[in-house]
Image (cartoon, rainbow, N blue to C red):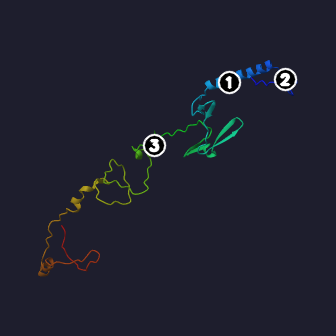
Amino acid sequence: MAIQSINIGSIANDGTGDDLREAFNKVNANFTDLDSKLSVAEGSDAENLGLGEGLFAQKSDNTLQLRSIVAGSNISLSGGGNSITISGDASMKQLIVVSDSGSVVLGTGNQTIRIQGGTGTTTRVTSEDVFIDIDGTNLVAADTAPVLGGNLNANSKNISAAGTVTATSFVGPLTGLVNGIDVSSLDQFVLGFDFGAIVPTINSFSQYFAANTDVDLESFTIPNASVIDMGTFA
C-alpha cells in the first residue's frame, strides 16, 4: 500500500485540511502497512537456487548480503542495467587440433575431442596426463619394406631363418653353404694337402749337391732368378 498523506490545509485552521478522524485513520493505516512490512522482513530469508556457487551470503538485520562476482584470469565483467556480462579472452574461444591427416576446430562449446590409438598404439588417461603407448611386438614384421638408416648392431645375437642374403662384402668367420658347398669343411682340403715325399733322381755329384742345398726364393713380390729342376711329378 502506498503511504497516505494527511491533508493539513494551506494555512492553520483554514478548514481545508483533513479533520482529526480522517487524519488519524490515515496514521493508523500507514502504521499498519509499515508493521506488516517489517514483520515480513524480519521473518524472511533468501536462498540460492540451482547448482554452482550461490550469490546469497547472509542476512544482517533487514539487509540481504550477496557475494560479489570477481573476474578471474582471462575473464572480464561488465554491468549495464539489470545484467552482468561475463566475457572470456578471445584466445580461449577456439581450439584447433591438427593431425597428420586432418584437423578439428573446437569453438562452439560442449565439444569433445577423443584421442584414440591406431595400429600398434593404445591410449590411457591418468589424472591430468594422457599417455600414448606403442606396442613394440612385431614392428619389423609389420613393415613390408623396412630400410635401415644406419648400421645394424645385432648385439651378438643370431639371425636365423634367413632367405637369400645379398652383400657387397663380408667380414668375419663364415659357416654354412656357399654355392652348395659347406665352407666349414674347406679347411681339410686347403690346409690338409699331403703330396708325399719328393725324391729326386741324382745322376751326378752336382745334382746331389743341388738337391741337398737350401735355395732362398726371396718373397712372392720380389723373387730371385734361381732356376730349380725338381724333376718330374708323377
- Closer to the chain start, of discs 1 and 2, is 2
Using the numbered discs, state the Cα–Cα distance from disc 1 to disc 2 in whole angstroms: 28 Å
Instruction: Look at the image and tell me in which quarter the N terminus lies.
Output: top right
37 vs 153: above or below: above
Q: Is residue 1 left or right of residue 48?
A: right
Residue named by callout 1: 37
Q: Compare residues 109 and 97 and report the one nearer the observer.
A: 109
In this view, the mark in front (3 or 1): 1
Residue found at the far front of this picture: 13
Query: Is the C-beta separation of discs 1 and 2 under 8 Å?
Result: no
In this view, the mark in front (2 or 3): 2
Task: Give the numbered dot on residue 131.
Answer: 3
Mark 1 is on which residue type? Lys
Residue 161: image location, x then y, percent? 33, 47
Mark 2 is on which residue type? Gly
- Closer to the chain start, of discs 2 and 3, is 2
- What is the secondary structure assignment of the residue under circle 3? strand
- Closer to the chain start, of discs 3 and 1, is 1
Mark 3 is on which residue type? Phe
* Quadrant assignment, res 173: bottom left
Residue 175: image location, x then y, percent? 28, 55
Task: Give the numbered dot on residue 17.
Answer: 2
Q: Compare residues 203 and 32 and report the one nearer the observer.
A: 32
Residue 160: image location, x then y, percent? 32, 48
- Please rate how many residues cluster around mark 1, counting C-alpha atoms within 10 Å: few if below 14, some from 14 to 19, many from 20: few
Residue at image location 41% in from the left, 45% down from the top: 139
